[in-house]
């Protein structure tokens, strides 16, 4: 049987784009994305979608109202669906057992309980959220313990590998799709149904089927490997700064070894985003619970190195500005955790901003896609700013990079937005205090050109020359 109706629970960065692409590629299937947040659903139904993602607007415009719907009527959508995707958030727990490390599964459990309460026919439930290994077992236990007479469930693991900023392309052309399920006739039949959905646009050879626990662990493993590469190159950036080697040259040389490959070797101010840190902390926690402390320590180091990198970069800014930034005007360009997204979750810019504010700096912030309100929410958090009145006096949000940089002592680049490469740096230099500094936390500007203009340039993974004008 080919599925006719899909319900996606959770209209976030994963649920929205994933369901939109399924609707685009499977015109015969009716896809409804539901969320408990009325505001989010209203945004999905408006001309200004709740998330910025290149190519997403076009896909939504093409399908919305035809075979793609965004709704708060969770009950109707669950009842009608053959397949239900759970794409709710799984943040790091901030209370109780496992605080600061374990994944908080309350939203996944909430979704499972909702399905059990509402479903009146057999369902395939797909775990798309990133979860600890063996979470599918809890979902199936909840569903089977609360099922209505005659209603049966199959739970599949189908982790999502999209990256923000390239989500649509990642969904259209994934390296692989992973489906984990129960090794039984019913389990295999459910896997087959989900394969049919993906086969509408993905070659069968790119769809991997495996046991549920392997699928769940593979998702954590993939994120851990990616983050590990960034921490590895960032650790070497510190060696470069101490020795005169250049981390870009080292990354090039190492990455040309076809066994290693060149991707994810870009040294930076540190990785951000909602998942790398959360998923590795979760992996560390699982290892500790499994009494594998050596394995836990091994992965914890990837996080420690990232913290070190963010602190090192912030410290470099302060040290270069004559060891004090008190009352200095500093432009922070880029607030999102990477380019082409408006997402600021775990953005290194927050860490940098906090350190500079703690040291008494006045910040002028500009990001092309992050709303002013979001920046204020992120910086108002009690773990960032202890005194709320500091917000008004010490932070200004600007609508253009030129305004943000005017009369400042230094520019700190935290996100590699393309438009920052195109800026007229002569104009910026003319309007800055002197000496004018640029701290390139992404290693993406033309440093030689900037030096010719007169800037003092500091970046990651390159030694500062003794003259101070490197
Ligand atoms: P998100 O916070 O953007 O969206 C989650 C949505 O689920 C929210 O809108 C929330 O209101 C909704 N929700 C929670 N409980 C609900 C319930 N019971 N009923 C209806 N709606 C409910 O999260 P996200 O970034 O989309 O991430 C979702 C999952 O996907 C996480 O497990 C994450 O680790 C994983 N993931 C994220 C990415 C990414 O790039 N963001 C990529 C791959 C995997
Ligand atoms: C990451 C993974 O790439 C996705 O496969 C995964 O699905 C997703 O996490 C998830 O599970 O949420 P995402 O966090 O959206 O995707 O973005 P990435 O492109 O992986 O970048 C993460 C962070 O690493 C960013 O801050 C980025 O600037 C940084 N980064 C990336 C580097 O510092 N150097 C690099 O070479 C690459």
Image: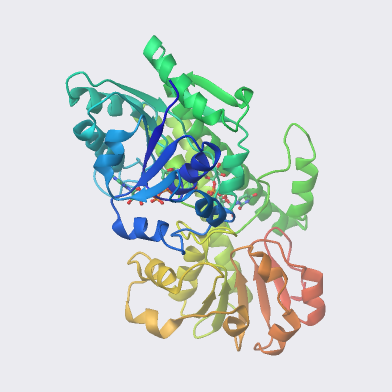
Give the x, y percent position of residue 267: 66, 53
Rendering coords of residue 465 (x, y %): 77, 69
Which of the 4 image quadrants contains residue 338? bottom right
Q: Nearer the viewer, residue 253 or 340?
A: 340
Where the N terminus falls, by quadrant?
A: top left
Looking at the picture, tell me which residue is in the foreground, 292 or 277: 277
Q: Is residue 166 above or below residue 125?
A: below
Q: Taking 250 as reference, is 84 above or below it?
A: above
Q: How is the rendered protein coloured? A: rainbow
Total numbered badges shown on the rendered structure: 0
Q: In this image, 38 relative to 25: left or right? A: left
Q: Taking the image as drawn, is residue 49 in sight?
A: yes
Q: Residue at x 61, y 26 (%)?
A: 206
- For the residue pair 459 and 71, the one nearer the viewer reads as 71
Q: Is residue 269 left or right of residue 380?
A: right
Indicate whether 52 appears above or below 372.
above
Residue furthest to the top: 185
Residue 385 image offset from top left, x and y in percent: 37, 71
Q: Residue at 43% of width from left, 50% of height from top?
A: 65
Give the residue displayed 78% in from the left and 54% down from the top. Answer: 245
The C terminus lies in quadrant: bottom right
Please tell me which residue is depicted at 48% across the width and 59% down the height of the picture: 343
Q: Is residue 353 left or right of residue 69?
A: right
- Name the spot of residue 246 as percent of width and height, x first: 77, 56
Q: Is residue 106 visible?
A: no
Left or right: residue 455 versus residue 32 is right
């Amino acid at each position: 049987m080919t599925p006719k109706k899909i319900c996606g629970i959770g209209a976030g960065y994963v649920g929205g784009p994933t369901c939109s692409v399924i609707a685009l590629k499977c015109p015969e299937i009716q896809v409804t994305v539901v969320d408990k947040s009325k505001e989010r659903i209203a945004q999905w139904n408006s001309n200004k979608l709740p998330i910025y993602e290149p190519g997403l607007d076009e896909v939504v415009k093409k399908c919305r109202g035809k075979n793609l719907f965004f709704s708060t009527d969770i009950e109707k959508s669950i009842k009608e669906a053959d397949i239900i995707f759970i794409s709710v958030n799984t943040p790091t727990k901030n209370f109780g057992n496992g605080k600061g490390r374990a994944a908080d599964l309350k939203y996944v459990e909430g979704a499972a309980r909702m399905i059990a309460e509402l479903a009146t026919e057999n369902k395939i439930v797909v775990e798309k959220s990133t979860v600890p290994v063996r979470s599918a077992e809890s979902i199936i236990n909840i569903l089977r313990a609360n099922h209505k007479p005659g209603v049966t469930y199959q739970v599949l693991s189908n982790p999502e590998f999209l990256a923000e900023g390239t989500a649509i392309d990642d969904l259209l052309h994934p390296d692989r799709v992973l489906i984990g399920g129960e090794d039984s006739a019913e389990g295999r039949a459910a896997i087959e149904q989900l394969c049919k959905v993906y086969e509408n646009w993905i070659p069968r050879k790119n769809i991997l089927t495996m046991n549920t626990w392997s699928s769940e662990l593979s998702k954590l493993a993939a994120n851990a490997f990616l983050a590990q590469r960034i921490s590895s190159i960032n650790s070497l950036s510190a060696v470069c700064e101490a020795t005169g080697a250049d981390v870009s040259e080292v990354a090039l040389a190492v990455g040309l070894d076809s066994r290693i490959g060149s991707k994810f070797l870009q040294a930076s101010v540190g990785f951000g985003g909602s998942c790398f840190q959360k998923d590795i902390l979760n992996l560390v926690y699982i290892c500790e619970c499994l009494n594998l402390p050596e394995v836990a320590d091994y992965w914890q180091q990837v996080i420690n190195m990232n913290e070190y990198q963010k602190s090192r970069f912030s410290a470099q800014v302060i040290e270069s500005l004559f060891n004090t930034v008190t009352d200095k005007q500093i432009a922070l360009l880029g607030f999102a955790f990477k380019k082409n997204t408006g997402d600021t979750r775990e953005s290194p810019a927050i860490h940098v901003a906090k350190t500079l504010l703690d040291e008494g700096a006045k910040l002028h912030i500009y990001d092309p896609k992050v709303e002013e309100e979001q920046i204020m929410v992120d910086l108002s958090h009690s773990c960032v700013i202890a005194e709320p009145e500091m917000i008004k006096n010490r932070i200004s949000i600007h609508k253009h990079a030129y305004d943000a940089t005017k009369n400042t002592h230094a520019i700190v680049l935290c996100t590699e937005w393309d438009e920052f490469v195109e800026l007229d740096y002569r104009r910026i230099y003319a309007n800055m205090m002197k000496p004018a500094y640029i701290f390139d936390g992404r290693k993406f500007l033309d440093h030689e050109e900037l030096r010719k203009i007169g800037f003092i340039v500091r970046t990651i993974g390159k030694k500062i020359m003794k003259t101070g004008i490197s």
